[in-house]
């Protein structure tokens, strides 16, 4: 701008009148609205009809809305029940503080007698994002793609187009990786909308974790590369030290498109069908008022693994016996809500060290740490807390060695490190917290969350009421298969080995051995004790998927076909984590973004839009460099 002004007015003008001129220029050019990182507007006046209506602006929905609105003569409406994200939700270290806030649907599993027993009411909290960006605004930002075998299995089940080789280009299409050592490989890319990088700050224990892996015979490797088994520093959806949600990544840069409307605080209540069972619109609730909007081409449901099945059932698509119970006329009898899968593990597995190197509240909630974040986008505030990841093989794992059955999340902190915030968001009972974790208030602690990658136990989502504002019933059925406990107990033993490596012994590492209330009759570190602990401190890492299963026509449990069209109706697709036929072996945010990317191309293809060359280019580039 300076050179333009110089050319226009000459140097003498610049010295004195630069600032008022700048102010006028910025106002005239609406600098804020042109800034690709400023927030999108909440469209007030909606059209009566759009080409596409996308329900839910989360990990997948934000991608779909962004990509469909690339077609200038398509009008796209994105309906989002929640508000816009803010400065606090941007701070990686404070990710836990968005839970139970207005950004969270605040769901809970139904009470159980066999899991979540350490939580108030024997129910686990199931946070879900109710905000533009969805659960990508609440999540821990960990970027993992899953195992190549996951996708090859999807294809083997009859889902043409979803093999690893066919989905990898879509991971690459989104990605803007900021770590040169990763972008030099064919498994990472730059220039996409989604920023991925290692968090700029880590504790000394992060490197100890990698060294421990080597001592245990595992390689340190990019677990998003060719082989998944191994240990790695976390890669995360972080941009310049702050959260890169899908709203920031995919919606902000395109917010000035005239053909894209975003309606926040707008909850879809029902999808409407005509006599030919074609989706023709949506009813919604906005600021307390009910409305209707119609569509010319399609409704895309991207409300997530809990709300998508709920909305389908409310609209007459679901198990006929269940819908009839609620007096809902059946439009398509499908196994909606079945097949619920989630990653589950042991919460609160804690270790102590002797040195002051862990992440404790009094150490990170200081003025200088905050200033470092605000001014330099650096320091402890930029870590999502999970510093290291590992994918390991227990004795039950596939003998190939490259399809691990357990994942570790390593953190230089534990339940006690953040005052009682973790107690609050996990819903731990006072008795459990006071017995096990309160005594650690002044201790230096770290933890591993051992997680089951491919659970055999599955659950379901069902309606509790015909009222769309009532939370649906969530029954995860954790640990109904004994094999799930067997694998996890082996995973816990591997976690204990990490503490025994010389990498951790140099800090005096040892497990915290106070036993879980309710499990006192078992000796610490026996199979029975760990089973009991798992059934008490059952830890969902918030990855529900698979409740609107993708599958071929011959599969009676499938809800959508491999082009994500809902069976038995027209003009309706589901695009989010609920379509995964089986849960991926890793954190699902990146895979769900991939699903959004691939679905966008499928939709464009089905409406005969000329193919963009970018994905083909990625594919060619990948195979040439292999
Ligand atoms: C606390 C937490 C931590 C996590 N950590 C990680 C992690 O570190 N890495 C990782 O890979 N994954 C993580 N996950 C999981 C991951 O974020 C989710 O699996 C993913 O974001 C889900 O994407 P989605 O598009 O299926 O649904 P969502 O992102 O949940 O999007 C659904 C959207 O639909 C909106 N919506 C729902 N119903 C309606 C309606 N009726 N009308 C209008 N709008 C509606 C919601 O408000 C929401 O915005 C975490 C999740 C949570 C909750």
Image (spheres, rainbow, N blue to C red):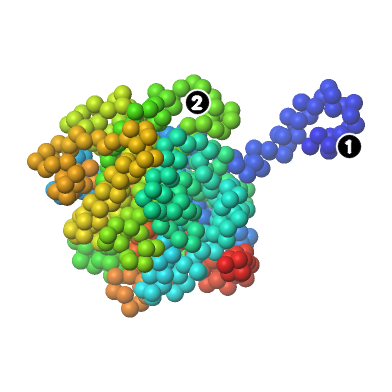
Question: Which of the 4 image quarters holds residue 416?
Answer: top left
Residue 529 vs 21, above or below: the answer is: below
Q: Residue furthest left?
A: 521
* Residue at 84 percent of width and 34 percent of height: 5
Between 107 and 30, the one lying in front of the other is 107
Question: What residue is shown with label 1?
Answer: 7
Q: Which mark is residue 369?
A: 2
* Residue at 17 percent of width and 41 percent of height: 524
- Find residue 626 and report its horizontal and vertical position in percent: 57, 67
Q: Is 506 situated left or right of 598 in this image?
A: left
Residue 305 vs 362, above or below: the answer is: below
- Find residue 595 and report its horizontal and vertical position in percent: 46, 61
Between 306 and 212, the one lying in front of the other is 212
The N terminus lies in quadrant: top right
Question: Which of the 4 image quarters holds residue 183?
Answer: bottom right
Comparing labels 2 and 1, the label whose residue is closer to the camera: 2
Q: Is 507 situated left or right of 83 in this image?
A: left
**Crowd class of label 2 (few under 14; some 14 to 19; many from 20; radius 10 Å):** some
- Find residue 358 and report its horizontal and vertical position in percent: 39, 31
Residue 57 visible in rendering? no
């Amino acid at each position: 701008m300076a050179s333009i002004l110089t050319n226009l007015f000459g140097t003498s003008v610049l010295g004195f009148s630069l600032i008022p001129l700048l102010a006028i220029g910025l106002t005239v050019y609406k600098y804020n609205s042109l800034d690709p990182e400023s927030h999108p507007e909440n469209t007030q006046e909606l059209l009566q009809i759009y080409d596409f209506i996308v329900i839910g602006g989360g990990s997948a929905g934000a991608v779909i809305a962004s990509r469909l609105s690339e077609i200038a003569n398509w009008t796209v409406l994105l309906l989002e029940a929640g508000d816009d994200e803010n400065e606090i939700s941007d701070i990686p270290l404070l990710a836990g503080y968005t839970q139970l806030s207005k950004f969270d649907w605040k769901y809970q599993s139904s009470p159980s007698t066999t899991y979540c027993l350490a939580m108030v009411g024997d129910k686990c909290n199931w946070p879900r994002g109710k905000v533009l960006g969805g659960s990508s605004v609440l999540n821990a930002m960990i970027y993992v793609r899953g195992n190549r075998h996951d996708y090859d299995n999807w294809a083997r089940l009859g889902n043409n187009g979803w093999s690893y080789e066919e989905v990898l280009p879509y991971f690459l299409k989104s990605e803007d990786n900021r770590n040169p050592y990763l972008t030099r490989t064919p498994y990472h890319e730059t220039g996409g909308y989604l920023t991925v990088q290692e968090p700029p700050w880590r504790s000394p224990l992060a490197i100890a974790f990698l060294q421990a892996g080597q001592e245990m015979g595992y390689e340190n490797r990019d677990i998003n590369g060719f082989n998944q088994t191994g240990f790695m520093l976390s890669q995360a959806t972080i941009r310049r030290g702050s959260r890169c949600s899908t709203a920031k990544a995919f919606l902000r840069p395109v917010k000035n498109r005239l053909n894209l409307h975003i309606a926040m605080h707008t909850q879809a209540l029902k999808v409407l069908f005509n006599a030919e069972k074609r989706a023709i619109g949506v009813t919604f609730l906005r600021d307390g008022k009910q409305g209707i909007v119609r569509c010319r081409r399609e409704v895309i449901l991207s409300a997530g693994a809990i709300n998508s099945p709920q909305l389908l059932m409310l609209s007459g698509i679901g198990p006929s016996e269940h819908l009839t119970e609620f007096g809902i006329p059946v439009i398509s009898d499908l196994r909606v809500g079945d097949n619920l899968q989630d990653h589950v593990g042991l919460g609160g597995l804690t270790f102590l060290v002797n040195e002051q190197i862990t992440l404790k509240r009094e150490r990170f909630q200081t003025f200088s740490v905050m200033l470092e974040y605000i001014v330099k986008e650096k320091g402890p505030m930029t870590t999502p807390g999970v510093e290291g990841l590992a994918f390991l093989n227990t004795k039950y794992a596939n003998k190939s060695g490259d399809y691990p059955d357990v994942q570790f999340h390593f953190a230089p902190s534990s339940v006690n490190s953040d005052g009682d915030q973790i107690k609050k968001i996990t819903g731990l009972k006072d008795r459990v917290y006071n017995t096990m974790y309160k005594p650690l208030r002044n201790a230096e602690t770290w933890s591993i969350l051992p997680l089951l990658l491919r659970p055999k136990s599955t659950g379901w989502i069902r309606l509790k009421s015909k009222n769309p504002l009532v939370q649906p019933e969530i029954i995860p059925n954790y640990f109904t298969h004994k094999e799930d406990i067997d694998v996890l107990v082996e995973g816990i033993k591997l976690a204990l080995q990490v503490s025994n490596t010389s990498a951790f012994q140099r800090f005096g590492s040892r497990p915290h051995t106070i036993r879980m209330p309710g499990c006192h009759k078992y000796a610490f570190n026996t199979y029975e004790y760990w089973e009991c602990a798992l059934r008490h401190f059952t830890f969902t890492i918030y990855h529900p998927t698979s409740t609107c299963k993708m599958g071929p026509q011959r599969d009676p449990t499938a809800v959508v076909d491999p082009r994500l069209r809902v069976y038995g109706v027209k003009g309706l697709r589901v695009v989010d984590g609920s379509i995964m036929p089986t849960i991926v072996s890793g954190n699902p945010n990146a895979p769900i973004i991939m699903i959004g990317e691939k679905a966008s191309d499928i939709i464009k293809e089905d409406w005969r839009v000329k193919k963009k060359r970018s994905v083909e280019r990625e594919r060619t580039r990948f195979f040439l460099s292999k």
